[in-house]
Structure formats: C-alpha cells, structure tokens
Image: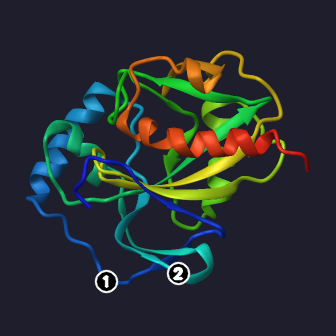
Amino acid sequence: MNTDTPRILWLRRPARIAISSTPWLPQCDPAAIDASWSLLCERNPRLVDGPCWHVTAVQRDGHGGATIHVVQTTYRMGAVRSTGVTTGFHGLGVKAIAHRNGRCLVGRRALACATYPGTWEFAPGGSAEPGEDPSIGIVRELMEECALAAASPARQQALLFDGVAGNWEIVHDIELAGEPDAPPNWEYTDLRLIELSNMPSPVSPCTEGMREIAVRVTQRSHEPR
C-alpha cells in the first residue's frame, strides 16, 4: 500500500468492517509521536485526538463487496505524518461525491488542516469513527462541515486507496437537499457546487483519484428512475 497512484475498488454492496483485537504498534518512537502531536496542536488548537481505525488489510469479497480489516488507534497516528514522523498508519476515512442537479460539492481545505492544506477536494470527508456506520458518519460530516442535509441515504460506491496520505477511503454517493451558503466549519475556507469540467485548483491527489467516481455518480443521477 505504498503507491502514489490512487487505487479504486468498485462496490456493488457496502464494505464489511472486520475488527481485530490485536493491538497495533506504530513503527517509531512513541515519544516522537507525542512531541509532533503537541507541535500540531500548538499550530491548530482545534485538533482533537479521537479514536479511529488503522487498516491492516483489504480483501475483495464475492458479489462486488470487500472486507476491511481494522484495529482501533487514535487520530494522531496519521496526523503526525505532516511533520515527517512515519508511524506506518493507514487510516480508514469516509468521503462523498455530494451532488445536486449534476454539479458536485467541493471545498478548499484550510491551511491549518494536517492533510492537504490549501487544496480543493470533494466535500465532505473525515475519519470513519469506531462504533458508527460509515454511511451514517458521512451524512453527519456533511452537516457538521458543510451545513447541508442529504436528500436520501448515502450509498457506498467504491473504496479508494490514497497512496500519498496512506489512507483507505469509503466513497459515497450523496444527493444534496440544498445548496451551500457560507462554510460553517474551520476545515473549509470555501464551498462550491461545480461542474466536473470546472474543478478549481490546486486539487489533492486523492481528489484526482475520485474524479472517475464522480463521473459515474453524476451520470447516474441523470438517468430515469
């Protein structure tokens, strides 16, 4: 899982999360992690070190599914990568192609973000939280980060491996119930509904990898139901 090229596994049914009870140990000195996390918190006091999943393996199932093997750890294990500390962490995140009338929701990440600061991405996104269904979590992220509601339940479309950030992302299709106003959350400095041909720049490598998913989702949204 060290390639810089985003890898997509298409899903015809929701991925299954298999939780391991075996503790995961980072591949570096814990003191270096703590020192780097303290530095990040000094730069951005809004950061919170909550629980998250570390992905140990992803396996294809029959009939268009996948199993994601995880163990619980904390957010700081991935965040400290931005300071040059390598822990061996591969997080599990949730992302969305949120759309309305053929246009997709994108946001520009704040400079205080630990990952991809200042770049545009498909919004919203976040960590998959232990104890929460990922498809419910991404709808929650939509409201918390963008102050927008979903017109229908989120549907899993694909698993994407972001080789730059080192994370697996469960990408969802979300139809929006309304259009964005001002970003309410510090993580975005701007939110827009755009045609895919008018994507602003710069974009993150993960966003580049999600373009193919966005094309499928927006094309499907125009099909008769």
Marks 2 and 1: which is nearer the front? 2
For marks 2 and 1, the one nearer the N-term is 1
How many numbered discs sit on the rendered protein? Answer: 2
Q: Residue at x 62, y 79 (%)?
A: 63
221 versus 1 height, above or below: above
Q: Amino acid at mark 1?
A: Thr
The residue labelled by disc 1 is 22
Is the N terminus in the top left, top right, bottom left or bottom right quadrant? bottom left
| Closer-to-camera residue (6/141) | 6
Answer few, some or many: residues within 10 Å of disc 1's Cα (few below 14, many 20 plus, some between 14 and 19).
Answer: few
**Quadrant in which residue 158 is drawn:** bottom right
Against 77, residue 83 (above or below) is above
User: Residue 124 at x, y = what percent?
Assistant: 58, 37
Callout 2: helix, strand or loop?
loop
Local crowd size for mark 2, using a 10 Å CA cut-off: few (<14), some (14–19), many (≥20): few
Instruction: Tell me what residue is drawn at x 41 percent, y 26 percent.
Output: 203
Query: Which of the 4 quarters of the picture holds residue 192?
Result: top right
Q: Disc 2 to disc 1, how far (Cα)?
A: 23 Å
Colour scheme of the rendered structure: rainbow
Residue at the limit of the structure toward the right, as seen here? 225
Would residue 159 appear left or right of 53 to someone viewing this image?
right
The image quarter containing residue 167 is bottom left
Q: On the picture, is 156 further left or further right than 176?
A: left
Q: Residue at x 22, y 56 (%)?
A: 2
* SS for callout 1: loop
* Point 72% across, 52% down: residue: 154
Q: Nearer the viewer, residue 143 or 67?
A: 67
Per the rendering, the mark at residue 61 is 2
Residue 77 image position (x, y, % from top left): 27, 54
- Image spot of residue 110 (x, y percent): 42, 22
